[in-house]
């Protein structure tokens, strides 16, 4: 969603964060977007009441990867920017405006863009922070914030259950702010942990095979450990039984019957947990923003990036295979926005939800590949990049504008 900086100057062999276009990063972003599309158009349950493959694979994980990879891209784009905070703030305003505009449509998608914009604003003080600061902020957001949220949310108004829109900005700005920061579908104070994790990863040399392998292995280990700990807490240690015996209330929805708890633990919630029992913080259920959910999905996002980087190194055949995926990943803002808008229209569904998915994904892959051949940014990416450059130039009118970056 953000542009990439120009490659390093020739002859600069010093180690440091990777700069320039990286096919593996783009491919990972493309995979995350296709995963989000799948969860938006394919129901969580099939006709037999079982979780669908799309939900089992992508629910919660795709959106988390979207956020982690945004942190990676943010590091790449600000690595050599003359005024990184100004340009990042300009991008945040533009992305937020697009998201609030989508909130005025009837899209069934839980639009992430207004939250995404706030992630960027929260990250402004961290753009030049050392790695240890990013690590501390990420750990605090992923592990500590959910505990504090569990204490605070009972005293807050009910969250907005519709997509944030310009109407909310005018009519109920305070409730909108609390929803985006604490109680919404992608609570920013917790999800900034994803962004910081991505920013930390973006400081690594992503062109090295060893780094890619380390990301894959570490991410997978974290994901497995988080799920294993959740299983231990909910099973042998009695957490599931305690939740079944608790009268819980789903934020913004209402009371939960004990018979509904198992399906909720499998299917997912709406961004935050009920506050009636501390055992809810032991779940790794999608979209709960519980510590183990956040850790698990951070791990899967990092593992996805590592895998994509490794595949991109397998040679020409692999490069051809992942080219369409990388093409989509180079213009995720454009495709995400178009996808969310299309779902607000009367799109013919055909014979199945799988057909509806293919109706969106096949044109996305084909058209993105053709667009990538032109060497241009995606349409929305180009507009936002131009506005960000203008904001930077106005911030320091006496300084030359930073070099134009290649498209992302």
Image: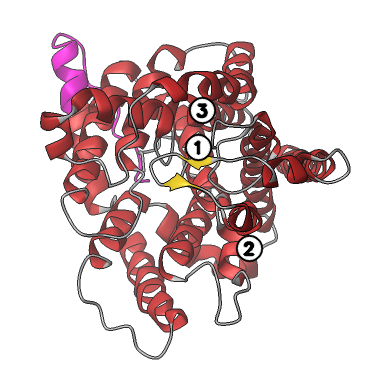
- As measured in the structure, the alpha-carbon distance from the residue carrying label 1 to the one carrying label 3 is 10 Å
Element under label 1?
Answer: loop
Percent position of residue 15, x then y:
65, 23
Indicate yes or no whether the magenta region holds residue 250. Answer: no
Can the viewer see residue 74? yes
- As measured in the structure, the alpha-carbon distance from the residue carrying label 1 to the one carrying label 2 is 19 Å
Furthest-right residue in this view: 236
Percent position of residue 358, x then y:
42, 78
The magenta region covers: 390-408
Q: Residue 6 versus residue 392: which sits nearer the camera?
A: 392
Instruction: Say if 302 sits above or below 53 in the image.
Output: above
95 left or right of 28?
A: left
292 left or right of 384?
A: right
- As measured in the structure, the alpha-carbon distance from the residue carrying label 3 to the one carrying label 2 is 23 Å
Residue 56 disc label: 2
Q: Residue 392's image quarter?
A: top left
Q: Residue 12 versus residue 69: which sits nearer the camera?
A: 69
Percent position of residue 83, x then y:
30, 16
* Label 2 crowd (10 A; few <14 / some 14-19 / many >=20): some
Residue 377 disc label: none
């Amino acid at each position: 969603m953000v542009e990439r900086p120009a490659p390093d100057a020739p002859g600069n062999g010093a180690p440091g964060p990777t700069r320039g276009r990286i096919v593996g990063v783009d491919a990972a972003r493309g995979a995350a977007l296709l995963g989000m599309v799948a969860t938006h158009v394919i129901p969580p349950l099939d006709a037999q009441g079982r979780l669908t493959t799309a939900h089992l694979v992508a629910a919660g994980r795709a959106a988390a990867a979207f956020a982690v990879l945004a942190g990676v891209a943010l590091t790449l784009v600000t690595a050599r920017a003359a005024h990184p905070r100004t340009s990042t703030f300009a991008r945040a305003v533009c992305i937020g405006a697009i998201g609030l505009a989508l909130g005025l449509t009837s899209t069934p998608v839980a639009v992430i863009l207004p939250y995404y914009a706030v992630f960027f604003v929260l990250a402004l003080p961290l753009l030049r922070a050392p790695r240890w600061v990013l690590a501390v902020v990420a750990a605090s957001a992923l592990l500590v914030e959910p505990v504090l949220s569990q204490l605070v949310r009972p005293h807050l108004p009910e969250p907005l259950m519709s997509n944030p829109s310009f109407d909310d900005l005018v009519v109920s700005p305070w409730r909108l702010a609390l929803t985006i920061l604490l109680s919404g579908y992608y609570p920013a104070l917790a999800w900034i942990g994803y962004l910081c994790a991505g920013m930390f990863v973006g400081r690594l040399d992503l062109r090295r095979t060893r780094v890619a392998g380390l990301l894959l292995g570490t991410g997978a280990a974290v994901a497995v450990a988080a799920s294993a700990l959740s299983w231990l807490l909910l099973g042998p240690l009695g957490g599931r039984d305690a939740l079944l015996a608790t009268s819980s209330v789903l934020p913004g929805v209402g009371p939960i019957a004990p018979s509904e708890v198992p399906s909720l633990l499998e299917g997912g919630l709406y961004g935050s947990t009920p506050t009636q029992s501390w055992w809810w913080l032991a779940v790794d259920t999608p979209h709960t923003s519980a510590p183990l959910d956040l850790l698990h999905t951070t791990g899967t996002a990092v593992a996805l990036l590592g895998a994509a980087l490794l595949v991109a190194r397998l040679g020409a055949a692999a490069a051809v295979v992942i080219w369409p995926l990388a093409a989509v990943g180079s213009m995720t803002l454009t495709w995400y926005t178009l996808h969310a808008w299309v779902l607000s229209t009367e799109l013919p569904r055909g014979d199945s939800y799988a057909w509806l998915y293919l109706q969106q994904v096949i044109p996305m892959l084909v058209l993105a590949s053709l667009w990538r051949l032109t060497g241009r940014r995606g349409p929305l990416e180009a507009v936002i990049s131009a506005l960000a450059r203008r904001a930077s130039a106005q911030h320091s009118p006496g300084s030359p504008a930073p070099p134009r970056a290649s498209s992302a």
